[in-house]
Amino acid sequence: MFLNDIAREPQLIENFLLHIYPLCNPTGFEDNTRHSRRGKDLNREFWKSSAEPEIEILEHELRTQHFNGIIQLHADDTSDCLYGFVREHTLTENLLRPALAEAGKILPRNVNATIDGFAARDGIIYSGYQGILAAPMQSEPPFEIVFETPHHAPMELQVQALVVAVRTILREYRQLISFAANL
């Protein structure tokens, strides 16, 4: 859906270079589980010298591409509502907050004080699991966001919420960067 939007409205990504990895755990996707067929939760394997081929490929990309931002899209089977993780950057929170607000028009936002075992505020978790997909420590990009939809929500609504979230993040990033350029 997002790629179709880009094809219809190329100005959405004007001045952006997006690298889109639509599926990072193909066997888990095929088996409808978060684990690969080798029994690994791939999103706990990053930067741990993992021999998993998917991890090796993505770590290589993260090391060599020097991304300015990373947006991960996930479905959570333990939450009935939207939420997100940020990695200790004010910029990241200022991108995630409006994305949650806009996507919250499609699916409700999780406002619990604890989400996925972490302290949360207004649907935002400020810490995270060890081994998640992230930039190498020596090259942290300006923002890293994990955006979660409820796995049990209808797929069509999850997709709509994710597309709205990504569009909002890109719009907000463009505005923040243009504002910063004028400082």
Image (spheres, rainbow, N blue to C red):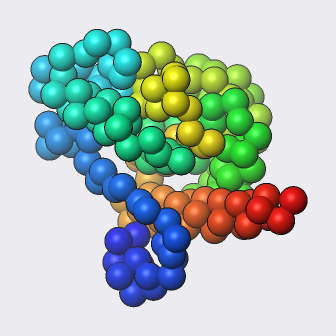
Residue at 71%, 60% (x, y): give it: 177
Q: Residue furthest top?
A: 48
- The relative height of residue 91 versus residue 14 in the rendered view (above or below) is above
- The relative height of residue 67 versus residue 16 in the rendered view (above or below) is above
Estimate the x, y position of residue 145 in percent, counting from the top left: 56, 42
Residue at 74%, 50% (x, y): give it: 94
Q: Is residue 29 left or right of residue 158?
A: left
Estimate the x, y position of residue 55 in percent, counting from the top left: 26, 28
Estimate the x, y position of residue 60 in percent, counting from the top left: 28, 32
Q: Quadrant of the C terminus?
A: bottom right
Residue at 59%, 20% (x, y): give it: 117
Q: Is residue 86 left or right of residue 157?
A: right
Q: Camera-side residue: 20 or 29?
A: 20
Q: Residue furthest bottom?
A: 8
Estimate the x, y position of residue 69 in percent, counting from the top left: 53, 47
Tag count: 0
Residue 1 falls in image quadrant: bottom left
Q: Is residue 86 left or right of residue 78?
A: right
In this orientation, does residue 101 appear? no
In this orientation, does residue 96 appear? yes
- The relative height of residue 47 versus residue 108 in the rendered view (above or below) is above
Residue at 51%, 82% (x, y): give it: 11
Q: Residue furthest right?
A: 183
Q: Is residue 125 left or right of residue 34?
A: right
Q: Camera-side residue: 31 or 47?
A: 47
Q: Camera-side residue: 73 or 58?
A: 58
